[in-house]
Image (tube, helix red, strand yellow):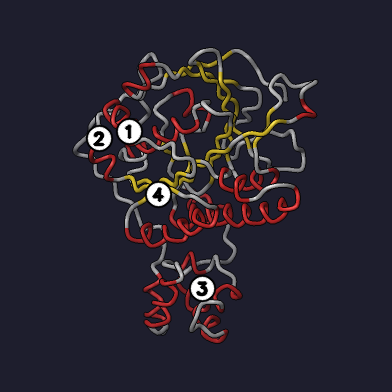
Amino acid sequence: MAPSKQYDEGGQLQLMMDGDRIEEEEECFESIDKLISQGINSGDVKKLQDAGIYTCNGLMMHTKKSLTGIKGLSEAKVDKICEAAEKLLSQGFMTGSDLLIKRKSVVRITTGSQALDELLGGGIETLCITEAFGEFRSGKTQLAHTLCVSTQLPLHMHGGNGKVAYIDTEGTFRPERIVPIAERFGMDANAVLDNIIYARAYTYEHQYNLLLGLAAKMAEEPFRLLIVDSVIALFRVDFSGRGELAERQQKLAQMLSRLTKIAEEFNVAVYITNQVIADPGGGMFITDPKKPAGGHVLAHAATIRLMLRKGKGEQRSLFGRFIHQSSASRLLLAPGTPNRVGESYSFRVGRAWRQRGQMQLRRSQSKMQP
């Protein structure tokens, strides 16, 4: 049984080194190379890899139409390849008990704060997308920097025991901010930075191509977290006006679909930040008339949604964890955890956090109106 988390009075995670404990984890995917044992030509396997497909799991996430678009793969070859992949994988129905066992592979990555971990049901989850939205300077990128470090903690310390991929669309990643956070967790800052791969994206197409290239790295190295900060920024720049809105949402849906597939294919956590837009119709009834950008497309893609709001001075407020799980648009429900509707948490991002990477949270007595 996993050890319980140890926190101090301020809600900070206390790390206790245990050199005798070794964590081993089974590989969560089947390499595309295993198709050769099923009679598939090695040249065809190489063509799949050149197209960014490195696992059988990822192969089954592609349509036959997209596979036949790969140069050198005919419809007959694609049918044979898919049939071979199905033999290696269990893609059909399974019992609820089997699914429960499969769900045990989910890793929850600590944020380093007891209150925030409780709100998230243990931390940031793998196999799904976690979205944090809020206006500028609300703490979205700071949380991303903290997760870059906590993800590299061993599993028994409630980390992810893996590397981090960071796609930056706004130019806000700062490696010097990683150093004090790593020191706070008692980790070597240089080693932590070496386990973070970083890319700056300048267009939405560049952003999508970076995701395609990640498959090769994740198939070879133990990654546990993918961060996109922010997921919507380049779409708001590259598409303008209502005339391009439909195309923008379609391209955004494709991007989010790719993120979901990466999360499930490699058992990684996907943390995305999102901007907010004004909601003119909500000003009369809502104190803070802002809503997340991206519309319903982004809302449906994220399993976990965090709303960050600036408080007074250096204080930040964080509200709720929710998923739109039914047609009732006001139903705020998170899978696998008690209903957290109305719960409010606030935390301070002060000098201590910026210099030593400390995050202090306290439960607020205020409630959100459902």
Left or right for 131, reference 33: right
**In which quadrant of the rendered image does the N terminus lie?**
top left
Which residue of the protein is positioned furthest toward the left in this rendering?
19
Numbered mark located on residue 189 in the image = 2
Foreground pick, 78 / 328: 78
Left or right for 222, reference 81: left
Q: Position of residue 79 (x, y in %)?
A: 55, 81
Query: Whole-Å distance between the Cαs marked 1 and 2?
Result: 7 Å
Give the mark nearer the N terminus: 3 vs 2: 3
Q: Position of residue 214 (x, y in %)?
A: 41, 57
Please tell me how crowded label 2 is: few (under 14), some (14-19), or many (20+) other residues with Cα within 10 Å: some
Numbered mark located on residue 86 in the image = 3
Q: Residue under circle 1?
A: 178
Which picture quadrant has residue 136? top right
The residue shown at (50%, 69%) is 59
Which picture quadrant has residue 192? top left
Left or right for 234, reference 111: right
Query: Whole-Å distance between the Cαs marked 4 and 2?
Result: 19 Å
Q: Residue under circle 4?
A: 199
Q: Are marks 1 and 2 in contact (CB under 8 Å)?
A: yes
User: Helix, strand, or loop for circle 1?
Assistant: helix
User: Helix, strand, or loop for circle 3?
Assistant: helix
Foreground pick, 118 / 286: 286
Q: Nearer the viewer, mark 3 or mark 2?
A: 2
Residue 252 visible? The answer is yes
Residue 1 visible? The answer is no
Dot 3 amino acid type? Glu
